[in-house]
Image: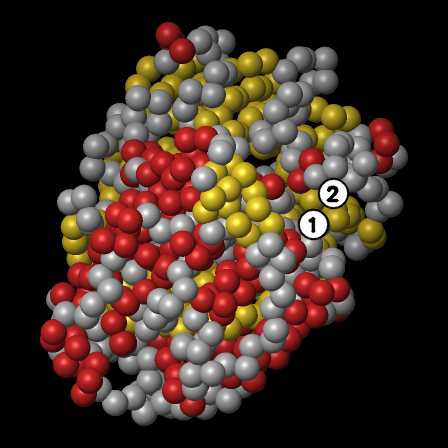
Amino acid sequence: MSINLRHSLTYRRLVERRLFFPPLLLVVLLTFSLSITSLAQEKEMNYPETPQIKVVDEYHGVKVVDNYQWMEDPGDSKVKNWAAEQNKVAKGVIDNIPCCDAIKERLNELWRYDDETVPHKVLNGERLFYHARKKDDEKWVLMTKKNEKADAEVLVNPNEWEKTETMQGLSISRDGKYIAYGKSTGGDENPVVQVMEVETRKILPDGLKGWKQHPLSWLPDNSGFFYVAQPLKGEVPEGEEHYWWTVYFHRLGTDTKDDRKIFFSPDNKDVYTSAQVTEDGEYVIFYYWHAYKTEVYYKKVSWREPIKPLITGFDAQYGVDIIDDKLFIMTNKDAPMQKMYVTDLDKPERENWKEFIPEDKEAKLYYTAPVNGKIYAVYQQNAFTRIKVYDFKGKHLRDMELPTMGSASVSGYWSRPEVWVRFTSFTYPPTTFQYDFDNDELVLYKEFPLDIDVNNFVAEQVWYDSKDGTPVSMFLLHRKDLRKDGNNPVLLTGYGGFDISMTPHFSTVNVVWLEAGVMIAIPNLRGGGEYGEEWHEAGMLGNKQNVFDDFIAAAEWLIDNKYTNPEKLAIEGASNGGLLVGAVTVQRPELFRAVHCGVPVLDMLRYHKFLTHRADEYGSSDDPEQFKYLLEYSPYHNVEDGVDYPAVLFTASENDARVPTFHAMKMTARMQEANPDDEPILLMVRDNSGHGGGTTISTLVEQVAEPMAFLLSQLGMNNPLRPPTKAGL
């Protein structure tokens, strides 16, 4: 059998796709006039010439034609030149959108202010560390104080480094005498760790093994620290330098070659590793993590003690803490919403485990924080945070009252009195409190520094049914004056993967959308972590189509309930969210006006051959059964000639350590080939950026403003009026 990329949709999908507009929508489209620039009216984009070099790959007896496989070599001059020409086309279009400069100006207003993070007091001593940023700074600065009353001092100032260099990773010794921190370049996620003596600011000559070095945890005596890294090229077979995560130990003052290889998998390159010294300084806990399952090992800090297995078999997820010779185990083993057990450390066998916090069928136990002699259990219920407080014997003492429905985190030390609570919601800017347990009160520590009037904004949660009848929750953010007349501009965005939860949080980017008059819709798709492991599993591997169905159903619900119509509906997603919007674009193109697809995975037959692949989430075309469903939904392999696709902006990053740029490039080429004279299909490949974006505030402003301007323009909003705001904004 031979499958050409132009004709790989199944008959079933062709039948299910709505290629004809319903009568009411047809009337709307015939009578609706957009006051937009030539961007949407221009039907002949001047795309650069794109060579087609036919390659035929055979998968389990099925031949698949790929004309753009030549783009997979990022070092090829032809690839670089083609991408540069595409950038020129995209920049030429976006730079002419009237609202682009206004968006940049507003983002600069919202992002540039004097700010600082909550201070971290060392476990043994009085020294504090925190990050600060002045209004004109491009990067955060690491600050320190000898004690709470002492003057603040600059410790590490990345603003004095090269423009593309950023600080990534930080580990502070327990007394604050030393710090180990990483310096990466252009968002490449490849930090090189150096060690500083805090009092003198002296950079020590110590170096570490491998690449992608991340400092983890110091020993109590300051003799050294654990770190994790990957092998250098040449130390493993070609391409495997992106795998084989290993925990090493570096002793201060010793040569790099003497760093000890402590914890690693000898036979599985996909296993992630980590290590953490317990708060009491008595033990080190080690983790293997693979395919959403964990194994746990531990040892006494003494080098004479061997590493012992605690939980093996990769049968579930486990998180472990050791407190006062008690072993606390949180797991989703036989508990999709997670629960916690406890046992004596000298009786770690599973048969000795006793239930400490039972599973709550209505709320996912997200994590626990042992602070000030209490166990704070942080739950997600309907994607909102709930916090329960337990004593050391497992007695439920109370629920913590939060300011409103939103997202909260708890942090602190078991042996220290400070209980830090960070809270945010869609209309509640991030705020830091200290929790006074005796008075059951959240005491304000630090408010959001900008005076943004959120009273005109509304956040609500709704529920809708997906294609198979599964109820799905969705957050809606909009201005109070919204009218359900079917004509509101809406941005629909989502993620739906990797057990990641989309929970309420305040975003100044959302503020700009709302000020422009755009409603934001965020569904909690299957594949995420909002409703436990079963919810995650319902959207991974062979169930991935559920995620796309959930998103499509969200769009249909917004249209059916008179919030918007297809000409006013834009979608946006990045990374796995880029796969999401790429898939729904080719499956249901008539639902959307415009798409921003960022750092996406789009060629699902070849993605696993590059960088660190995630076959545990998606599957692999090397497997005959997984190949079938991957081909069925792979966005790149389901583009069709002659289909009226929405306007699309693909963005990618040269230094992306997780997703190669070729996904966005191949998809751009294929869509331009399929539909050369219709809506614009644009590509921007960013330099000096990684998977998470740019390295400075200025770069991030540009990278947020340009896609926003593109989508607003496509929605007919080239000059969106900003509503009156408070003075100073």
Residue 462: x %, y % from top left? 17, 57
Q: Is residue 471 visible in this depiction of the protein?
A: no
Quadrant in the picture for residue 171: top right
What element does badge 2 sit on? strand
What residue does disc 1 label?
Answer: 190
Q: Residue at x 36, y 89 (%)?
A: 36
Q: Residue at x 52, y 33 (%)?
A: 622
Amino acid at pointer 1: Asn
Q: Is residue 640 visible in this depiction of the protein?
A: yes
Quadrant of the frame with the N terminus:
top left
Residue 359, compared with residue 495, is above or below; it is above
What element does badge 1 sit on? loop
Amino acid at pointer 2: Trp
Q: In the shown orientation, is residue 231 left or right of residue 254? A: left
Residue 560: x %, y % from top left? 14, 65
Q: In the shown orientation, is residue 232 left or right of residue 475? A: right
Sequence-first tag of 2 and 1? 1
What residue does disc 2 label?
Answer: 211
